[in-house]
Image (cartoon, rainbow, N blue to C red):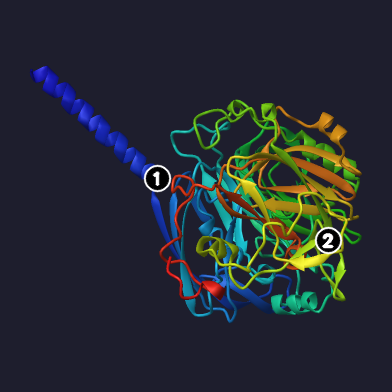
C-alpha cells in the first residue's frame, strides 16, 4: 500500500511538473510601446523619424514559439497608425494582422492592444508600420522567434546572435514622399542604405567562435547583396524554414525578406568590412559596417569585397539553391519533410500579373488590371458585420484580364483548406517582391518570360523551402504552392512600398461557410471600429 501511494505521489509530481513546463513554454509577454516623432540623422541630415519608446529602429522583440504577446501600442503621432508583424501567421486571428483591410488605424492620442501568438513558428522576422508612408520614417524593428527548449535545432548554439535591419533610405520626410505619390509621380531613387538605422555599425566577436547574423531587408524598394570581407556565410534559416546548410560568399536579400547565417571567425585578428549594396539598379548604393574581432590588431582596410554582377541568372541560381532541410524539426517535433506538399494536386491555379498603369492621369500599380483602393471600413469588419457596399468578391479575376486598368477594393474569394498554385507573372523590367499575410508558402519555381503549363516540369516538388515573401525577377515568373489552412482576410501585396501604396495589392478571403471558433477566433472585445462599423457591437 505504501509503495502504491509513493508511486501515485511520484506520478502526481511529474504531472504537475509537466503541466508547469507547458504553461511556462506558452508564456504571456507584455509590452507597452509609445509611438512618437523624433529627430534622427541616419544619413547625416536631421529629419523627422518615427520612434518607438524613443528608439530608432524600434525595440527588438525576442520571443519563443507559442508565446502569447499582449502589446499596448500608444499612438502619439498626428496621423492614424498601425503596425504589422511581417511573417507572423496570426493563426485563426487575422483580427491582429495590423493592416487596413483587417484593422481600423489607431487614431492620434489613442491606443490599441494587440493580442497574438507566435503559434508553431520559429525564425527571423520584422515588424513595421503598414499605414501611409510611415515605414519610410522608421517604426520598424526586429522580431525573432526562438525554438522551445524541447525542440532541437540543426546547429550548435552560436556564441552570439546579431540582427541586422538593412534597407534603402530617403532624406525626404515620409509626408513629403507621400505627397509625391499622391500627386501621381513615382519616388526618386533612394539616398542611401542603412544598417540598423545607421550609416556605420560595428559587431564585436571573439576569434574562433561562431555567430548568428539575422539579415532582413526593411527597405522600401531595392534588393541588396550582403557579404562579409574574408568570411563565408552558412545559410541555416529562411523566414521560419530550416534549410540545407550551404555556404555562400554573398547573399541577395529582396524587399521584405529575412535570412539567417552562421559566420565562423576564422581569420587573422583584425576588423573586416560588412557590406550591403543595391542590386539591379542603375546607380549602386553601398553601405558598410564593421565585423570587429575583440582581439583585433588592425582596423578595416583594403578594397570592399566585390558583389556579384547584375546578372539575373546568378541570383536565380542562388535562389534555387535554397532547399528545405527535410529531416530538421522546425517549431514542432515532426520533421519539416513529413508534409509532402509535392504529392498534393492543387485545386486551382491563380495567375497574378503586376503592371504600372496611368489611371486618371496618375501613376498607379495594379494586379490583374485592378489597382487597390482602401475602403473607409476594414474589409474584415465589413465581412463580420455583413456591411454591404464595402467590397465585392468578383472585383478581381484569378487570371490577367487584359481589360482596362481601374480602381477597386479588390477581394478574391477562396475556401478554407484549399491547396492552390499561384503564379506571379512580372512583365515589367523591374524586380518585384510579393508577400502573403497569414501564411508561408512553398516557392517551387522561377523562370524567365511567360509562364506556361510546361513550366511545371521544372518545379521543385521535393524540398522547396517555405517563406512568406518571394522575389520575381524582371520579365519573369515565380510559382508558389499554398495550403489555405488559416481562415481569415489576408493581404496579398507588393513588399515594395510605393507599389503597395499605389495599388499593387488585394485581399484573399479564406472562408468557411460554417462558423467555428476552432477555425477562426471571434472579433476581439477591444476591436477599434471605424467607417460604417461605428456604433456596432463586437
User: What element does badge 1 sit on?
Assistant: loop
Foreground pick, 97 / 122? 97
Residue sitting at x 61%, y 73%: 376
Indicate which disc residue 394 carries: none
Looking at the picture, tell me which residue is in the foreground, 314 or 381: 381
Residue 26, numbered label: 1
Q: Residues within 10 Å of mark 1 (few under 14, many from 20)?
A: some
Label 2 sits on a secondary structure element that is loop
Q: CA distance from mark 2 to mark 1?
A: 43 Å
Query: Residue visible at 13% across and 19% down?
Result: 4
Quadrant showing the C terminus: bottom left
At which x and y percent is residue 485?
A: 57, 42
Quadrant containing the N terminus is top left
Left or right: residue 112 compared with residue 248: left
The answer to whether residue 145 is left or right of residue 140 is left
Residue 94, horizontal then vertical, whole percent: 54, 55
Q: Is residue 63 visible?
A: yes
- Quadrant of the image occupied by residue 286: bottom right
Residue at (51% x, 70% y) in the render: 53
Tell me whether circle 2 and circle 1 mark residues in contact (CB < 8 Å). Answer: no
Residue nearest the observer in this picture, 267 or 460 = 460
Q: Residue 87, percent across and down? A: 61, 50
Question: Is 83 rendered above or below residue 449?
Answer: below
Whether 246 is drawn above or below 231: the answer is above
- Residue 263 visible here: no
- Please name whichever residue, 227 or 121, is drawn nearer the observer in this view of the structure: 121
Question: Which residue bears the numbered disc 2?
Answer: 285
How many marks are shown on the rendered structure?
2
Amino acid at each position: 500500500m505504501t509503495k502504491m501511494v509513493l508511486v501515485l505521489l511520484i506520478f502526481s509530481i511529474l504531472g504537475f511538473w509537466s503541466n508547469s513546463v507547458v504553461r511556462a513554454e506558452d508564456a504571456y509577454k507584455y509590452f507597452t510601446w509609445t509611438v512618437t516623432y523624433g529627430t534622427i540623422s541616419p544619413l547625416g541630415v536631421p529629419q523627422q523619424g518615427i520612434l518607438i519608446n524613443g528608439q530608432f529602429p524600434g525595440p527588438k522583440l525576442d520571443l519563443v514559439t507559442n508565446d502569447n504577446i499582449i502589446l499596448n501600442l500608444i499612438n502619439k503621432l498626428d496621423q492614424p497608425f498601425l503596425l504589422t508583424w511581417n511573417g507572423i501567421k496570426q493563426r485563426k486571428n487575422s483580427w491582429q494582422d495590423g493592416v487596413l483591410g483587417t484593422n481600423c488605424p489607431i487614431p492620434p492620442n489613442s491606443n490599441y492592444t494587440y493580442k497574438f501568438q507566435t503559434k508553431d513558428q520559429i525564425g527571423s522576422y520584422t515588424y513595421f508600420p503598414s499605414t501611409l508612408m510611415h515605414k519610410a520614417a522608421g517604426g520598424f524593428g526586429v522580431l525573432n522567434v526562438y525554438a522551445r527548449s524541447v525542440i532541437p535545432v540543426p546547429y550548435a548554439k552560436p556564441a552570439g546572435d546579431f540582427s541586422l535591419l538593412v534597407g534603402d533610405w530617403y532624406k525626404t520626410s515620409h509626408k513629403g514622399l507621400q505627397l509625391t505619390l499622391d500627386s501621381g509621380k513615382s519616388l526618386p531613387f533612394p539616398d542611401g542604405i542603412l544598417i540598423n538605422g545607421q550609416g556605420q555599425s560595428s559587431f564585436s566577436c571573439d576569434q574562433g567562435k561562431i555567430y548568428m547574423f539575422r539579415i532582413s531587408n526593411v527597405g522600401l524598394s531595392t534588393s541588396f547583396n550582403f557579404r562579409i570581407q574574408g568570411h563565408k556565410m552558412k545559410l541555416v534559416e529562411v523566414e521560419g524554414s530550416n534549410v540545407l546548410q550551404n555556404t555562400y560568399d554573398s547573399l541577395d536579400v529582396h524587399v521584405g525578406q529575412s535570412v539567417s547565417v552562421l559566420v565562423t571567425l576564422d581569420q587573422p585578428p583584425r576588423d573586416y568590412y560588412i557590406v550591403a549594396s543595391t542590386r539591379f539598379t542603375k546607380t549602386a548604393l553601398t553601405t558598410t559596417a564593421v565585423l570587429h574581432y575583440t582581439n583585433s590588431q588592425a582596423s578595416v582596410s583594403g578594397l570592399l569585397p566585390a558583389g556579384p554582377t547584375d546578372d539575373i541568372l546568378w541570383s536565380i541560381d542562388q535562389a534555387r539553391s535554397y532547399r528545405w532541410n527535410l529531416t530538421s524539426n522546425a517549431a514542432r517535433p515532426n520533421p519539416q519533410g513529413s508534409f509532402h506538399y509535392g504529392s498534393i494536386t492543387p485545386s486551382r491555379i491563380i495567375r497574378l500579373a503586376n503592371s504600372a498603369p496611368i489611371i486618371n492621369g496618375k501613376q498607379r500599380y495594379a494586379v490583374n488590371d485592378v489597382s487597390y483602393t482602401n475602403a473607409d471600413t476594414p474589409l474584415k469588419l465589413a465581412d463580420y458585420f455583413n456591411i454591404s457596399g464595402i467590397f465585392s468578391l468578383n472585383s478581381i479575376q484569378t487570371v490577367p484580364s487584359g481589360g482596362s486598368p481601374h480602381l477597386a477594393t479588390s477581394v478574391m474569394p477562396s475556401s478554407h483548406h484549399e491547396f492552390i498554385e499561384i503564379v506571379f507573372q512580372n512583365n515589367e523590367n523591374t524586380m518585384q517582391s510579393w508577400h502573403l499575410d497569414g501564411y508561408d508558402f512553398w516557392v517551387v519555381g522561377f523562370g524567365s518570360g511567360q509562364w506556361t503549363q510546361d513550366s511545371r516540369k521544372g518545379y521543385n516538388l521535393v524540398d522547396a523551402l517555405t517563406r512568406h515573401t518571394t522575389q520575381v525577377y524582371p520579365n519573369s515568373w515565380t510559382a508558389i504552392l499554398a495550403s489555405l489552412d488559416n481562415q481569415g482576410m489576408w493581404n496579398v501585396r507588393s513588399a515594395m512600398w510605393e507599389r503597395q501604396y499605389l495599388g499593387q495589392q488585394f485581399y484573399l478571403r479564406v472562408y468557411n461557410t460554417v462558423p467555428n471558433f476552432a477555425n477562426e477566433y471571434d472579433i476581439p472585445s477591444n476591436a477599434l471600429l471605424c467607417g460604417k462599423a461605428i456604433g456596432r457591437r463586437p
